[in-house]
């Protein structure tokens, strides 16, 4: 879906933002710097946009738990709060690609 991909510029922004706390990009859930992936808060399959306000770094394990774990809602809630903290005025309704 157009608009759900992540540009190189956005990828750099997210990696830099999520590295501020530890001095290097790390998983927002567990703090691991290994096996990082860029995760969508609203999944691409649901029209989640490839913008910093919808993305964060996650290790392979935590990303898998977010998508298919036993309690994904707990991780989604943490992800939601993390993004709200990063972006005052964060609005979940603006994270999906609008169909024209």
Image (cartoon, grey):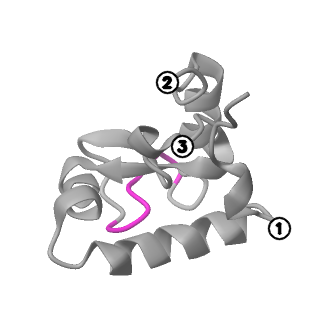
**Residue 21 position within the rendered picture, expressed as x and y whole percent measured from the top left:** 57, 61
Q: Is residue 29 magenta?
A: yes
Q: Main secondary structure of the magenta part?
A: loop
Evaluate if marks 1 and 3 touch, with contact meaning CB atoms under 8 Å apart: no
In the displayed image of the protein, which residue is found farthest to the right? 89
The residue located at (70%, 71%) in the rendering is 85
Question: Callout 3: helix, strand or loop?
Answer: loop
Q: Is residue 9 above or below residue 56?
A: above
Front-most of 67 and 18?
A: 67
**Residue 86 position within the rendered picture, expressed as x and y whole percent measured from the top left:** 71, 63
Task: From the image, tell me which residue sits under label 2.
Answer: 1
Task: From the image, tell me which residue sits under label 3.
Answer: 48
The residue located at (34%, 39%) in the rendering is 37
Chain part drawn in magenta: 23-30
- Residue 64 marker: none
Q: Is residue 7 above or below residue 82?
A: above
**Residue 9 position within the rendered picture, expressed as x and y whole percent measured from the top left:** 65, 22
Question: Callout 2: helix, strand or loop?
Answer: loop
Q: Quadrant of residue 83?
A: bottom right
Q: Residues under labels 1 and 3: Cα distance?
A: 19 Å
Is 54 on the left or on the right of 72, as rendered? right
The residue located at (44%, 62%) in the rendering is 28
Tell me which numbered mark, 1 or 3, is placed earlier along the sequence. 3
Front-most of 85 and 20?
A: 85
């Amino acid at each position: 879906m157009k608009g759900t991909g992540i540009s190189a510029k956005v990828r750099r922004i997210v990696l830099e933002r999520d590295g501020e706390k530890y001095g290097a990009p790390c998983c927002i859930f567990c703090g691991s710097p290994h096996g990082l992936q860029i995760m969508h808060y609203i999944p691409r399959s649901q029209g989640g946009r490839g913008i910093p306000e919808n993305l964060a770094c996650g290790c392979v394990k935590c990303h898998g738990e977010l998508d298919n774990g036993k309690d994904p809602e707990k991780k989604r809630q943490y992800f939601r709060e993390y993004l709200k903290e990063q972006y005052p005025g964060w609005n979940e309704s603006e994270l999906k690609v609008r169909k024209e």
